[in-house]
Image (tube, rainbow, N blue to C red):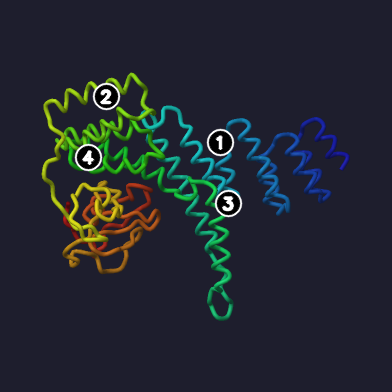
Amino acid sequence: MDIGNKFSLVGLCDQAVQAYLRHGDITTAVQTCVTLNQWDTAVNLAQQQNFSQIEGLLSKYAQHLLDKNKKMEAVALYRKANRHTEAAKLLAQMAKETPGGAQKNPDRIKKLYLLAALEVEKYKTKTLQLQTDATMGTITTAQTVQSLITQDQSVASDKALESPWRGAEAFHLYLLAQRQLYEGQLEQSMKTALRLADYEDILDTQTIYSMIALTTYYNKFFMQCSKAFIKLEASLDVNEEMRTKFGDLALRIFTRNPPRDPPSKALPCPKCNTRIRDWSVSCSNCNYRLPFCVASGRSIFPEENTSLGSHGPDAAGVLSTGAGVVKCKTCRHRMYVSEVRKIRNCPLCHSHLDASASHFHDAPRY
């Protein structure tokens, strides 16, 4: 012990640890690592020796990293310790605080939100792994209820955990609309951009409605374009100089183009069967919000001919939902089968999709 103390006093961490371990004093060995700021050694030692106070040690180490603004290292530590909710909260915070926001770093922000969502999914999976009765192979009701209560309490206090995929969805749609616009897919870009209005809690007003105004203008949907300009001119989130510029631009556009939308295809609402436009985000009659295809940004409508749906076994990475639509097994977001055949990975979460299975058939394109 005296030798260990002497090594510790002169800053020789490894030698001090070895001396303490020879005497079976794990606690002092770990504490010496902490005192000498050798946190990696402390954590590895605690894990190797099954140190009973490892949770507290990890918390202290994480705070040490955060104090030094090493947030990504703290995330890695939380993940290593299977503390998924803490990792998710920190990743979501990093996404919100990314310099430049959607205008300069949309790719990075999407990745951070995606990592946060995946951590929440890991937490949910871990929480819902209920104990199975050894003889009957059944799960008790009490266990199920307790697990769900625990999960709900853990995530309800943080929006990033309660709706973990919203951030990734918002930036995915924003990037998708941009790409479609630059590739000349004007109609597709408009349909994707219109859905951004659902994410005002994630994206700023100017980013959302500038994109909507631009894509609707190119598609000559001047009613939707007018609504976007009204938002831009009225929002206090947009600075006064930009509001003035938007007002001048709107005046030039709408003196030559009356605010009317051209005719477009109408399809039945999946809930109330009211005919709505194929670019609609929600039903004007029952307010049902249509799910969207993460590969194309289009709203998903029920297929009239269900024979086009998939009826075979699920391919790896996808869940068949019938009616020409499949769902990613990782993020559980939907996409048209016709889009899946063009890609190898889920456009949202980038998990591998096996689209080569024989049960995939083309779905009608709307």
Viewer-closest of 272 and 178: 272
Reading the image, the residue beneath label 3 is 82
Q: Secondary structure at mark 3?
A: loop
Judge from the rendering whether residue 341 lies leftward or rightward of residue 155; answer left or right. left
Q: Where is residue 191 shown, x and y percent of the image?
A: 23, 43
Reading the image, the residue beneath label 2 is 246
Q: Nearer the viewer, mark 2 or mark 3?
A: 2
Mark identifier at residue 71: 1
Q: Earlier in the sequence, mark 2 or mark 1?
A: 1
Does the CB distance between marks 2 and 1 fall below 8 Å?
no
Q: Is residue 104 above or below residue 85?
A: above
Viewer-closest of 60 and 277: 277
Q: Is residue 190 visible?
A: yes
Residue under the point 22% across and 23% down: 249
Mark identifier at residue 190: 4
Viewer-closest of 208 and 272: 272
